[in-house]
Image (tube, helix red, strand yellow):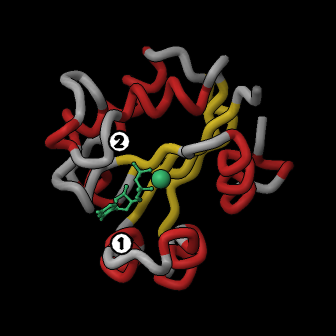
Amino acid sequence: MSNLTFTMIKPDAVQDGHIGAILAKINEAGFRIKAMKMTKLSAEKAGQFYEVHKERPFYGELCAFMSSGHIVAAILEKENAVADFRTLIGATNPANAEEGTIRKMFARSLGENAIHGSDSDQNALIEGSFFFSALEQF
Ligand code: UDP
Ligand code: MG
């Protein structure tokens, strides 16, 4: 099992001023930051990142949202990183997320749901290398 996951603080949470609070929760949960940057995705880059969802009805809206403002991308390290991070962020729809999860606390809606977390070890590596070169990972 790999010990890495990849996350993005999404444009809604950046705009709403939640970067600091979200990073504090990530630190408190025991994740080490291996790489981090604030950046902005073009619509094209957002489309590439979410390519697995391109047949889904929400794909266009998702790409428009994810390219609408700044994001904070990071690679995180912890034992059981993928599963533990999904637990920390909560369900995709914040209405269904557990109390105390990042999405419950900070998300606006199902689409604008504050944070991304990889769904597998393999995707964590693919997504991390989408944003960070080997020289940018510590
Ligand atoms: N999404 C949406 N409508 C949906 C399902 C998902 O807008 O019905 C968005 C939401 O921002 C979600 C992203 O698409 O985080 C990716 O969907 P996925 O099913 O992979 O959810 P996640 O892994 O982020 O929980
Ligand atoms: Mg997903």
Side (left or right) of 3 relative to 49: right
Q: Nearer the viewer, residue 49 or 133?
A: 49
Residue 57 screen position, x and y as percent? 33, 78
Tell me if residue 68 can be seen.
Answer: no
Picture residue at 65% right of the left edge, 55% below the top: 127
The amino acid pointed to by label 1 is Leu
- The residues bearing labels 2 and 1 have C-alpha atoms spaced at a distance of 20 Å
Q: Residue at x 28, y 28 (%)?
A: 101
Q: What amino acid type is highlighted by mark number 2?
A: Ile
**x%, y% of residue 135?**
85, 49
Q: Quadrant of ligand 1?
A: bottom left
**Residue 9 position within the rendered picture, expressed as x and y whole percent measured from the top left:** 41, 49
Q: Quadrant of the N terminus?
A: top right
Badge 2 crowding class, 10 Å Cα cut-off, few under 14, some 14 to 19, many 20 or more, is some
* Residue bearing mark 1: 62
Q: Quadrant of the C terminus?
A: top right
Report whether 39 appears left or right of 23: right
Query: In the structure shown, which secondary structural element does the residue marked by tag 2 occupy?
Result: helix
Q: Name the one closer to the observer, 50 or 64.
A: 50
Number of residues whose C-alpha sits closer than 10 Å to that of mark 1, classed few (under 14), some (14–19) or many (20 or more)? many
Residue found 58% across the figure and 33% down from its top:
82
Q: Is residue 13 above or below residue 33?
A: below
Question: If you read the primary sequence from the N terminus, does the residue marked by circle 2 or circle 1 appear first?
Answer: 2
Residue 8: image x %, image y %?
A: 48, 50
Is the residue marked 1 within 8 Å of ligand 1, measured from its CB? yes
Check whether the beta carbons of the residues at disc 2 and disc 1 lie within 8 A of each other. Answer: no
Give left or right: position of 68 versus 83: left
- Number of callouts: 2
Q: Is residue 22 above or below residue 54?
A: above
Residue 10 appears in the rendering = yes
Return the residue at label 2: 19
* Secondary element at image label 1: helix
